[in-house]
Amino acid sequence: MLTISNNLNMKLIRLLILFVAMASTQISYAKWDEEKIGEFKSEEVKTYYYKINSQGHKLVLDSYMKRLIFIQKDKTFKRNIDGIKIDGEYVEAWGDYFSNYPQQTAVLFNDKDAVIERLKNAKKIEINVLYYREGERVSTFKIK
């Protein structure tokens, strides 16, 4: 009788360990990647969150300036952001160019605070990008 109870306890412990391992793997995947950058003039270190999709595009969540930065290194010609979808819901957005960094486009919003909070918890972000030479494309980022 004692061996049956011990075997059952061992199976339950193994099942619990497997469940915890699966949950921790899911939690580590379910977040933005983190990058810390130090400022030159001050000793402050800022934390930025980013995700890279399968197309090689990078999306940086800049909570300090309350914007997204869309980076596409392979194409430096003009593009415009036509809007984004956060978990399937359309959010009005527009692009602002960085003159010194042609691969980067800032994505700006009307209601910055609310949109940044939604972006932090988003599972899927779709960015409508209008290329002046190629037409409209959608760049998809899966966060969670």
Image (spheres, rainbow, N blue to C red):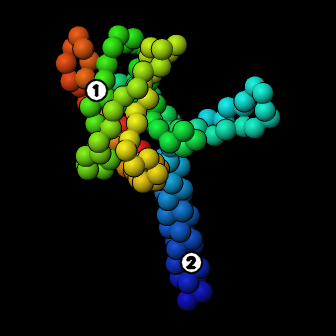
| Image coords of residue 103 (percent x, y) | 44, 16
Q: Nearer the viewer, residue 113 or 129?
A: 113
Residue placed furthest toward the front: 110
Q: Nearer the viewer, mark 2 or mark 1?
A: 1
Residue beneath the point at 54% across and 56% down: 24
Residue beneath the point at 56% across and 78% down: 9
Residue beneath the point at 26% across and 31% down: 82
Q: Nearer the viewer, residue 128 or 53?
A: 128
Residue 75, compared with residue 95, is above or below; it is above
Q: Which residue is mark 1?
A: 129
| Image coords of residue 107 (percent x, y) | 40, 33
Are the residues tagged 2 and 1 within 8 Å (C-beta)?
no
Residue 6, compared with residue 35, is above or below; it is below
Total marks shown come to 2
SS under mark 2:
helix
> Which corner quadrant of the image does residue 59 belong to?
top left
Q: Earlier in the sequence, mark 2 or mark 1?
A: 2
Question: Quarter holding the N terminus?
Answer: bottom right
Q: CA distance from mark 2 to mark 1?
A: 55 Å
Q: Which residue is mark 2?
A: 9
The kind of residue tagged 2 is Asn
Residue beneath the point at 37% across and 44% down: 110
Residue 78, compared with residue 129, is above or below; it is above
> Which corner quadrant of the image does residue 52 belong to?
top left
The crowd level at tag 2 (other Cα within 10 Å; few <14, some 14-19, many 20+) is: few
| Image coords of residue 61 (percent x, y) | 50, 39
Q: 83 left or right of 23?
A: left
| Image coords of residue 134 (percent x, y) | 21, 14
Residue 33, compared with residue 131, is above or below; it is below
Residue placed furthest toward the left: 135
Q: Nearer the viewer, residue 10 or 119?
A: 119
The kind of residue tagged 1 is Val
